[in-house]
Image (cartoon, grey):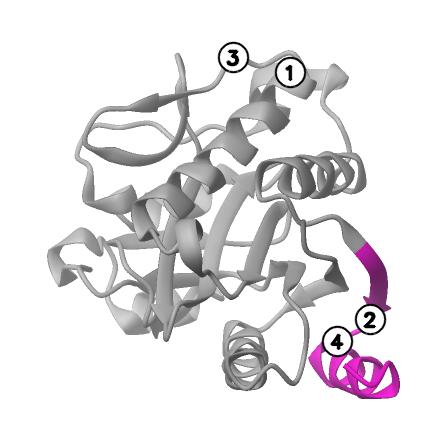
Amino acid sequence: MTDTLAIQIEGAVPYADALALQEELVARRIEDAIPDCAILLQHQPVVTLGSRGRRDALLRSEDELRAAGVELYHASRGGDVTYHAPGQLIIYPILKLGGSEADSHGYLCNLEEIAIRTAGDFGVAAFRRSGKTGAWTASGKLAAIGIRLRRWVTFHGMSFNVDLDLAGFRHIVPCGLEGESVVSLQGLLGEGAPTLAAVRERVCANFSEVCQRPFAATIDAVDCADARLQIDALGA
């Protein structure tokens, strides 16, 4: 088991800022200058197109998205098109995989397992679907996954819908899947839905168990720049 650093960023983070932080941490992890870590945050409204993203999965032009307060970003992750906004918990693990862990499919399955266990912690039955990534419920998709590996170091990761406004998904065909619904814990559970902080706690616990990486330290940052400063202060 490997000790890991949790980096929790409060507030809604611009997508470009989070991607720049990931790129920096991936480079440092490749050089063993930092330990494995996981960034947990929310994003400002953004539509991202993955490496398999198709323009015809966008139902609005870039100008229309901008007018609605939504950024459009071409991401380096795998997968198709998705939407991020406040109320959705994102986890970006920066992990060096090696030995028996050097398996991108197995790692993706681990992220699905974290989402499934987290949903179950709040009484929601979630499951995998053959040929599709993510975590699903009987009512629709609850968690989306898109990853990339660079020299066996992971980045990008998973988004888990807690209490975001699902209307933002009307801008796209989520994950390029026609006729599929997207759900949140708030929509499924109503007044009994957990807070985002409660979901983050369970995601961290399930990540530690599934990925065999207990968190040895936690950074609570106000933004990505603050996260960098605190990482450097730890000597990581």
Viewer-side residue, 105 vs 19: 105
Judging by the rendered image, the residue that carries numbered circle 1 is: 189
Q: Which residues are magenta?
A: 216-236
21 horizontally vs 149: left or right: right
Please tell me whether residue 211 is drawn above or below residue 13 in the rendered image.
above
- Amino acid found under the numbered disc labelled 4: Asp
- First in sequence: mark 4 vs mark 1: 1
Q: Would you say residue 220 sits in the magenta stretch? A: yes
Q: Residues within 10 Å of mark 1 (few under 14, many from 20)?
A: few
* Residue 156 lies in quadrant: bottom left
- Amino acid found under the numbered disc labelled 2: Ala
Q: Residue at x 79, y 42 (%)?
A: 197
The kind of secondary structure element at disc 2 is strand
Viewer-side residue, 149 vs 166: 149
177 horizontally vs 34: left or right: left
- Residue 4 position, x and y percent, is 72, 60
Q: Which mark is residue 223?
A: 4
The kind of secondary structure element at disc 1 is helix
Q: Select label 3 or label 1 by which is in front.
A: 3
Question: What's the distance in space between the residues labelled 1 and 2, CA to CA?
Answer: 30 Å
